[in-house]
């Protein structure tokens, strides 16, 4: 039988009496006790799980003193990582008098997780039923971290390999890499799907150099042979050429082929990489344009009937025009006014669009794009402006230098006006929704004689997914809530409105914060869209005792800054976010905490849009900066504190802008 008397020196009752000659029983017990205490985390609980003994190792690893551990259950160090079923199975085992083995993640007093390999031994009482439980644990945190790091590295390497293979298999251009034999062995080709599609060959056929050579038109075969021979002779490491292939179905395919080689340290080519882009459409367009320009009289008859403007200008800074169709008259100009350089197209581009148009054209040219589209405004001869779509084809000389731009300019003013009207209507709808949501938030806080209240609310757009409220529970209790919907936009706003209405209904007359949030979750879970959830912090303040009963359903822990100084307290009971589970798991995980608010103490409820705001370097604002701002201004009127937080956020992240809603609710007893 094990009694509480033995717990003052528990190891003497748990270790067998030594029978070896020459050993002193007391000394051996002391040695064993010292060894176990140095290696193992030891705890003894009563039949209800209340800790009655904790060794020094338990205290040092958990960060709690023995006085803080004894009298508590192991919920004090619970990490929240394991599901409820994990601990139910453990209790079923040890209550049946069986030894339980397992790995558990606990959490230190400072909030850091630590892993232990655990053995729990039931200690029976006089009736044979477990009276106490002896828990022996080994700290395996370092092993777990090493396993996690190794697994993450292996996963990352595997993912990179998969991504590279995915890119190769589904690249928009044809790719084939060749392992070149240098000892008489055959070259091995590895073509991707697009390479085979361009030539109309199967992967097996595209892996045969003879098939590739036969597919090349004879006129281009000789040129490719010369360039390839130059590479093998050590001249350069790549070449690009435009060539023709005869597709399997008989039609001609134009391709831009780039071949690059890798060499061994001795200079021998070990691999060749072929990149093939289908440029048939461009070649056809170029051929049509060349033929059209050659027959200029026919061109003018065609383009002058078109509502679009055809223009050809040289690739020079002032865009001198060589040809413009008569349809330019729709903008109030005559074609000859551009040909004789009275006007230039850059000159009639709207001043507000000019720099952008020039920058875009320079970027397309630098990137080697053969054609591109732009939208900008032209200034008409009467001073009005019209929106145009400019489809430009770039002309190159034999050296690859850009010589001309050929533009097809179409008036899209009516389309842009329709888009503007639609956008304005959407903006009006969003503004109206934002105004409705704005009215749902408290703007004048109720007069609670013993409490000061202030708030900051900044949605990322007209409507947001954050919510805060101050609501009466009964004559002597008030509720304070802050919540955050996963997501943005109208969907998030609608769910938040539903959450507000449900919470107000469930909160009336109920002084248990956990009961209220369980009811809200049960009401909302069935209507919550897939992938959406709501985090909530809800507290009920008793005005007579200044005691706050609170729950944290997946939300950031509230901050409690004591007027007397000392470290900031985190109100961080466990709980799942609303909508993740509608049944017993949510109810079991939700824990209700209690804190006493004294005069001058500052309670801060906030959403992650504040703490996760980042500066230009990607550094987060963080909880510590928020606490520093509140401490710095804590003695000022409470309505000035949100202004100070907003100003500090603006200075911290002046360029990054809002990427998430920012909400802050402050409560301070007088």
Image (cartoon, helix red, strand yellow):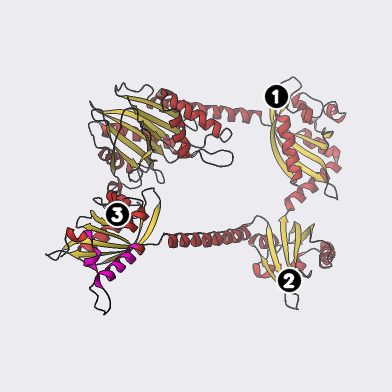
- 458 lies above or below 70: above
Residue 141 forms part of the magenta stretch: no
**Magenta stretch: residue 11 in it?**
yes
Rendered-image quadrant of the N terminus: bottom left
Count of labels shown?
3
Residue that protrudes farthest toward the top in the picture = 382
Cα separation, mark 2 vs mark 1, equals 61 Å
Whichever of callouts 1 and 3 sits on the residue coming sooner in the sequence is 3
Of labels 2 and 3, earlier in sequence is 3
The CA distance from mark 1 to mark 3 is: 68 Å
Q: Secondary structure at mark 3?
A: helix
Residue 479: x and y in percent read: 30, 31
Category of crowding for the residue at label 1, using alpha-carbon neighbours closer than 10 angstroms: few (below 14), some (14–19), many (at least 20): some
> Crowdedness of circle 3 by 10 Å Cα count: few (<14), some, many (20+)?
few
Which of discs 1 and 3 lies nearer the camera? The answer is 3
Up-down relation of residue 79 to residue 378 (above or below): below
**Residue 608 in which image quadrant:** top left
Q: Given this view, does label 2 or label 3 mark the residue nearer the observer?
A: 3
Q: Name the residue at 28% across, 71% down.
A: 28
| Any part of residue 213 in sight | yes
The circle drawn on residue 486 is none
Where does the magenta region start and end?
8-37
Pointer 3 residue? 84
Q: Quadrant of the C terminus?
A: top left
Could you say where residue 315 lies in the image, as x and y percent from the top left?
Answer: 82, 39
Q: Mark 1 — residue? A: 385
* 635 lies above or below 103: above
């Amino acid at each position: 039988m094990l009694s509480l008397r033995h717990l003052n020196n528990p190891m003497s009752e748990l270790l067998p009496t030594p029978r070896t000659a020459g050993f002193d029983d007391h000394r051996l017990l002391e040695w064993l006790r010292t060894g176990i205490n140095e290696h193992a985390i030891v705890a003894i609980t009563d039949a209800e799980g209340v800790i009655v003994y904790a060794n020094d190792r338990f205290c040092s690893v958990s960060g709690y003193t023995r006085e803080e551990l004894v009298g508590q259950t192991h919920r004090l160090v619970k990490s929240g990582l394991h599901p409820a079923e994990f601990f139910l199975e453990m209790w079923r085992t040890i209550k049946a008098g069986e030894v339980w083995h397992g790995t558990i993640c606990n959490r230190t007093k400072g909030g850091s997780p630590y892993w232990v390999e655990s053995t729990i031994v039931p200690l029976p009482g006089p009736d044979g039923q477990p009276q106490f439980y002896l828990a022996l644990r080994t700290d395996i945190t370092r092993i777990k971290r090493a396993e996690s790091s190794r697994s993450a590295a292996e996963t990352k390497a595997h993912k990179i390999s998969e991504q590279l293979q995915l890119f190769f298999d589904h690249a928009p251009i044809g790719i084939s890499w060749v392992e070149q034999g240098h000892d008489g062995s055959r070259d091995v080709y590895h073509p991707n799907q697009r390479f085979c599609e361009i030539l109309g060959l199967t992967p097996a056929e595209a892996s045969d150099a003879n098939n590739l050579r036969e597919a090349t038109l004879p006129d281009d075969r000789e040129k490719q042979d010369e360039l390839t021979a130059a590479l093998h002779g050590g001249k350069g490491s790549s070449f690009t050429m435009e060539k023709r292939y005869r597709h399997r179905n008989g039609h001609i395919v134009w391709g831009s082929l780039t071949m690059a080689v890798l060499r061994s340290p001795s200079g021998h080519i070990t691999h060749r990489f072929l990149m093939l882009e289908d440029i048939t459409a461009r070649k056809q367009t170029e051929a049509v344009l060349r033929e059209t320009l050659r027959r200029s009289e026919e061109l003018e008859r065609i383009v002058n009937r078109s509502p679009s403007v055809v223009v050809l200008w040289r690739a020079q800074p002032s865009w001198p025009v060589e040809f413009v169709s008569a349809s330019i008259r729709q903008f109030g100009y005559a074609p000859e006014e551009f040909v004789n350089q009275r006007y230039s197209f850059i000159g009639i581009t709207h001043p507000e669009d000019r720099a952008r148009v020039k920058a875009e054209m320079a970027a397309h040219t630098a990137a080697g794009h053969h054609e591109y589209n732009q939208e900008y405004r032209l200034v008409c001869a009467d001073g009005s402006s019209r929106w145009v779509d400019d489809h430009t084809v770039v002309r190159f000389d034999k050296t690859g230098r850009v010589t001309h731009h050929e533009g097809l300019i179409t008036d899209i003013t009516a389309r842009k006006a329709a888009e503007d009207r639609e956008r304005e209507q959407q903006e009006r709808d969003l503004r109206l929704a934002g105004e409705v949501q704005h009215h749902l938030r408290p703007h004048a806080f109720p007069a609670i004689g013993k409490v000061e209240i202030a708030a900051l609310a900044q949605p990322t757009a007209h409507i947001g997914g954050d919510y805060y409220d101050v609501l009466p529970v009964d004559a002597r209790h008030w509720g304070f809530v802050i919540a955050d919907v996963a997501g943005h936009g109208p969907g998030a706003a609608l769910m938040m409105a539903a959450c507000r209405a449900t919470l107000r209904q469930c909160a009336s007359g109920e002084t248990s914060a956990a009961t209220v949030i369980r009811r809200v979750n049960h009401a909302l879970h069935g209507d919550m869209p897939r992938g959406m959830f709501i985090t909530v912090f809800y507290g009920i303040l008793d005005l007579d005792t200044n005691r706050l009963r609170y729950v944290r359903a997946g939300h950031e822990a509230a901050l409690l800054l004591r007027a007397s100084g000392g470290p900031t307290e985190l109100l961080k009971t466990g709980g799942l976010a609303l909508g993740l589970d509608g049944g017993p798991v949510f109810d079991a995980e939700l824990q209700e905490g209690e804190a006493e608010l004294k005069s001058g103490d500052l309670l801060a409820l906030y959403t992650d849009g504040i703490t996760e705001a980042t500066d230009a370097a990607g550094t987060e604002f963080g909880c510590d900066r928020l606490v520093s701002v509140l401490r710095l201004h804590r003695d000022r009127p409470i309505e000035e504190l949100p202004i100070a937080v907003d100003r500090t956020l603006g200075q911290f992240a002046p360029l990054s802008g809002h990427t998430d809603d920012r909400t802050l609710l402050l409560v301070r007893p007088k």
